[in-house]
Amino acid sequence: MKKSTVITATALASVIGIAGVSAALLTSTPPAPVAVSQPPQEVTAADEVQAIEEESTSTETTSTEDLLLYLIEEEKLAHDVYTVLGQTWGGNTFTNILASESTHQDQVLSLLNAYGLADPRSPEIGVFVNPDLQALYDQLIAQGLTSQTEAYKVGVLIEETDIADLTRAMNSTTDTSILATLDKLRSASESHLAAFSKKL
């Protein structure tokens, strides 16, 4: 074989080798991106309220039974939170509204009895059948125990939530006895909201 032929063959082999490497690089699968973990987001009491409200609006209709069972535990939540925060921070605001919350529960209980429904409330402070209300209670207590100002903010949050829930409940029923009770509860919550708001 001539020297020129050897050189040409060697050069050709080099070109083929380079082309092969280039093809391999072009057809190889790029490495998967590395997932960057995000720090967990703190769930606040306001987040819990929003989650409950979003869940309640996701279903257009709620049975009267479910409505009443939820409302009596919601009134118990207000009562229990105000009991704990009142014992912690004192003041007439929590004491006066606490007595009203007991009356509210009695009013809803009368509706439960009229529909033949068993009372779901636990006699223990801070214990709830509804898991959403249980989570909300825990969040509200944690917030309210940090300072007296935060305790009053919790009162505002509870009453705003009650008003919104009662308004939705009134829009979902035509039962006159239920509507009359809910209207009284909403008016009382509006008064409570004003009392807590004055403390901020």
Image (cartoon, rainbow, N blue to C red):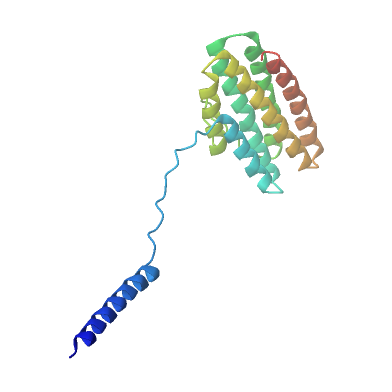
Query: 5 above or below 156?
Result: below
Is residue 5 among the parts visible in the rendering?
yes
Give residue 172's quadrant in the image: top right
Q: Nearer the viewer, residue 48 or 130?
A: 48
* Residue positioned most to the top: 91
Is residue 125 among the parts visible in the rendering?
no
Give residue 151's quadrant in the image: top right
Residue 193: x and y in percent read 71, 21
Residue 167: x and y in percent read 75, 35
Query: 182 above or below 190?
Result: below
Residue 163: x and y in percent read 72, 30
Tell me which residue sits at (75%, 19%) in the image. 191
Tell me which residue sits at (64%, 26%) in the image. 158
Query: 165 above or below 193?
Result: below
Q: Is residue 72 left or right of residue 145?
A: right
Q: Nearer the viewer, residue 84 or 19?
A: 19
Tell me which residue sits at (65%, 9%) in the image. 92
* Residue positioned most to the bottom: 1
Q: Nearer the viewer, residue 160 or 166?
A: 160
Q: Which image quadrant: the N terminus? A: bottom left
Tell me which residue sits at (54%, 23%) in the image. 143
Q: Nearer the viewer, residue 148 or 132?
A: 148
